[in-house]
Every structure is written in structure tokens, then in C-alpha cells.
Amino acid sequence: MGIPRLTSSLEPFAERIQFSSNDSGAPKSAVIDGPGLAFHICNQSLGYRTDLARASPSYAELSSRVVQWVRQLQQTGPRIDAIYFDGVLPKFKKAERLSRLQSSLTKLQKFRSNHSFEPNPAVLGSLNTPFLVPTIIEALLASEFCDKTTVVPGEADSWCAHHAKRFGSVVFTNDSDLFAYDLGPRGSVMLFQDRQFSSSCDGPDVTATRLIGLRFRPAAIAKRLGLKSILPLAYVMTQDFYKSFNEHVDAARKLITDGTNTDFAIFSEQFSFPPAQQYCLTGLNENDASSLQHSLGILDPRISEFVHQALSASSIPDEDAQPMTLDMYLPFLIEDPIRASAWNYGSEIRRLGYSIITPTTNHPTTIAEFSRRGERITERQFSLHPTSTTLSTCIHQSNTLQTWITTFSSLPPALSWRLFAIYLILQDLIPKRNPPFHRNHIKQALTNSTPGKDWDSIHFAAQLQAVLYSLRMLHQITSICLAASQKFRSPEFVNTVPASQQFKSLEFVNTVTSLHECLRTLPPLTELFPMKVQDTGAAAIEDEEMMAVAITKMYGLLGVEEPVLAPDTKKKRKAKAGGKENRSPALSLKKPLNIYSILSES
């Protein structure tokens, strides 16, 4: 997350280097800090805007730019060995993470107070792309770099550093923390903002011939400064921001690094290479372990972090288990901060996912979701479903989704899923709202074609994102459950693990499989969260009547007549009293689509 002033202080010691396909002196291999690249491209794209009020770059545009950047890097000569993304962050960074989330909320609150009318979230920059990193991972996994892209069971910078030390690679990053790691005598660092391709990266067919930039060699720089490594210098610079660089170097030389300095020892721990604690792979044969490891390596980072906590808990015997809390940091959404959190929607979908992947033990397990609640970032705690409830809920969810997919099969998948999420939201909002949304509002939300922004539409869009991402979480969690199912069904597991943890029976796995199959049609994030109408697949609909018919069906399932622009009190009472009489028989389902109170404002 960076050490203030370290980069600028070391810049005079960096060397300008040129990469080209025939340059024998340049490093032969490169490793990329994935999150750093994602935010670099995002900030670069935002910087291209001459007007801050212009729309934010779409996820599709950002994905294309990232893949093109990696292609151009490869064309200049160095072999790209790996692109690492954070999959688990250490617990000691909890305070810093919450501080950053609170800082984002403060910016949103200030924006809300200054733009009560006609707000334009594009001016919030990268905050307006809450699903940036998982979108970039998805794009790289769909490219020729899929075998290089990995969500690791740790921090990306630690894995980059370890790779650089082992292979003498250059690390591409914007994180000054990399200077403090032991990269070995040949490992080096290049910052994204300090490099320049000889060709523009705007076109898909442009061929890059050279890469020019500053290369930092921490081991050589430390030697020039009379230090064993940059680590002591990084430490003293975090202790006093007002000393000069020479004073910091002098303090670093005098620093006692033999372990007796407790503060320095604690600081140093974050720059070590701890072994990946993948307890979930124990007890699996080589093929099953490889399958599970692959599935873990393609998860969204925040989902990965929760899954690793849950799978690690599954390896704790009952006699050693203690009451535990598993943390989930939800993405920060652009919503109306004076209303209830958008993440209240989809909470039961997420709870089902947590219950599927978390073992049932004799000790209580609590889930702590971190998101905005009121005016601050805090946790919302809730318990897991009992195993029997998890099983029955999976069955009910599968039946509901199968019915929906069949009923709306004429729509492109992205529109069908967005309409499903809108349906879930309206199912909760209609009893509280007078009047219900008109079909034009539904169509605008469905295709993301709202011509003008207001806080109603912004908050509804956030609620839509919350439900859709909750479904994505459920999809990824079921994929891990199935990948790990061989472990839970193996004789070794059954014979050695207490019965209370053996909840992933054949019946359970088959039920989760059915649910997973229903979720397989979830589209990529570029379509699930479009910033342009064409990203939704709406352009493929030749007849708009098809969308109109789908919206009409949805209203029928909701049991309301449409369009309802301004119903009077009598009509409202009649609709409420009529209930089933107002529901179109042709659109009714055998079971109501009120999916176990998915959407609760409380």
C-alpha cells in the first residue's frame, strides 16, 4: 500500500533502461502486480478525459486496455512469467482497510452534500468502478495470458517479490513496498508510471517495439547507501516524515536489526515470504488438489479471501475449534449515503453462499460483512444456516432460477439476469413505494440507458449491483464447494473428521451441483455491470417488443398492473386485497418467487 516518499527518494539511484526484442542486457522475465496494473490503467483512462463530467470508462474499455498493455509489454522482449492478484490480505491490515473504506465514504458523503440535484458520479473517478479488479482478472483469464494470471493465497506484492528473487525478474508495479522486499541481487522493480512504450497503446493492432523506463535495483541501491537492504530505510521513513533523506539513511545505518528492536521486527514481518497456508489441499490426490487449486486461483479477490478462511476452518477438529468470525469485505458502491445500505439487498443470497462453504461444527461461526451502515463503515454480523436449512434453501433457489431462466429464455443472458435482480428489488420495494416503477424506468435500469442521473436512479443502480454481485458470489462459492467435494467424500475425510463437519454428503453435493448449473449462465462482469447500452447485449434484440413482453411478464409475477403511474388509494387497497386475482395466471409460478425474504431493508 506504499511507503510515503520512498519512491521519490530512491529515484536518483534508478537507471534508465530500454527493453526491446533484441536487447541482450535487459531482464529476460517479468512479473506483474495485477491490482497495481488495474488501477494504473483505470487512472490513466480517467486522465485521458478532458472533461471530468464525461462518463467513466466502461469495464469493457478498461479490460481491453489492460490486455493490450500486457501484449505490448510482451512484444518488447521480456517473458511474462506471472500476473499475480491478491487473494488473501493479512489481518494486521484490517485497520488500514477500514480507514480506506471510511475515506471513500467521506468522499461520497461530500459529493452527496454538494450535488443534491443532477449528480454525476463520473467525477468520483476510480470510486465509480467498484468491480474493477475482478473485471480485469476475468479479462486476463479470457485472453492468451490465462495461464499466467493467478489469484494467490496471499498478497500479490509478496508473490511478485518471491518470484523476482527466485528468477531475477523485473516486477512491474506502482507499490513502493516492493523496494523493501528482498528481491535478491538480480531482482528489480519498474513503476507503471515511469515506463513508456514507443507505440500508442490505443489500437488493438499496434506493435510495440521498445519499452523505456526507470529500473530500480534495491540490492544495488542499498549497497550504494551503505545498507544491507532497503528495509531499514523504509522503516525509519515511516517513523518520521520530516527528516531529510540523508538523515533517514543515517538512522537506517544505526538501526539495530538483530531482533531486539521489537517495532522493527514487527514491521519486517510484512515483508517476509510466509508459506501459503492452503490447508484445504491436504488429503487430496494430485488431480483433485490441482483442480481445487485452479478453482481457487480464478476467484474474485474478496470472495477468495472469505473462501480461504472457510476452507481453513474445515481443517480444524471439533475438539480444537473455538467460536470464530469470518470476515467479508464487500465492494464499496456508489449509492445514496443518506439511505439504507444497498448491500441490504441480496444479503440472504450471500448468507446461503457462506453457509454452503463453511463447515458445520459444534462451535458457533459468525459472518462479519464490512460495508456502509449509516454514516460509517462497520460490520454487520449474522449466523449461518443450519445444514438442513442450507439444503432446502439450495433446492428452492434452484427451482426458482430454473423457472426464471425458462420463462425469460428469449432475452440475452445479461438482460435476463439484470431483470431477475430488478424483480427481486421491486418485490421488496413495491409494498413500500407509491407508485411502483414505471416500465420506462425498468427499461432504463435494465439496459443502463438512464439519460440523466438522480439519487433515486443512482441508489437503485447500487441495489441492482448488490443483488447481481451476490449471485456471482454464490456462483463462485458453489464452484469451490464442488471442486473440494472429492475431499469431503473421501474415505480418509470420513474416517478422520468428526461427523459434525461431514455435511458435504453426496446429497448435499448433488443439490449444490443443481444450483451451480443454474448460475452458470451468469455473464461476465463487463455485461453484468454495463456502462454502455451495447454492453448488456441489448443491441442483439432486433425487436424492442421482446423486451416489452419480458417487462410485462415481470409485472405479472409481481402481481401488479402496469403501467401504474399514480394509483389512487382505493386502487392500491384493491390491488393489495385482490392479491392473486390481480396476478396473471399465465405468468404465475408453482411456487412464489419471494426467495426466502432475499430483500430486506432492515
Image (cartoon, grey):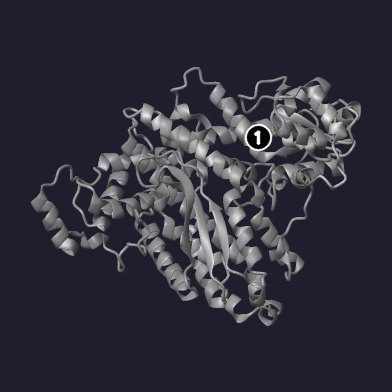
Q: Residue furthest left?
A: 570
Asked whether residue 182 is in view, the answer is: yes
Quadrant of res 231:
top right
In this rendering, the answer to whether 271 lies above or below 389 is: above
Residue at the (62%, 36%) spot, across then down: 38
Residue 37, image x, y percentages: 65, 34
Name of the residue lying farthest toward the top: 50
Judged from the image, the secondary structure of the residue bearing numbered disc 1 is: helix
| In-front residue for pair 395/576 | 576
Residue 205 x %, y %: 65, 27
Screen quadrant of the N terminus: top right
Relative to 462, is 312 above or below?
below
Circle 1 is placed at which residue position? 37
Give me the residue at 59% from left, 41% from top.
133
Q: Is residue 330 left or right of residue 175?
A: left
- Residue 460, quarter of picture: top left
Can you say whether 306 is above or below 493 in the image? above
Image quarter in which the C terminus is found:
bottom left
**Rendering quarter of residue 84:** top right
- Packing grade of label 1 (10 A; few <14, some 14-19, many >=20) is many
**In this picture, is 124 found above or below 102?**
above
Q: Measured from the top left, where is residue 276 in percent x and y?
A: 74, 56
Rendering coords of residue 409 (x, y %): 38, 54
Amino acid type of disc 1?
A: Leu
- The residue nearer to you, when weighing 446 against 152, is 152
Residue at the spot 28% in from the left edge and 51% down from the top edge: 429
- Residue 237 as seen in the image, left or right of residue 404: right
490 displayed left or right of 411 = right
Residue 300 lies left or right of residue 275; in this view the side is left
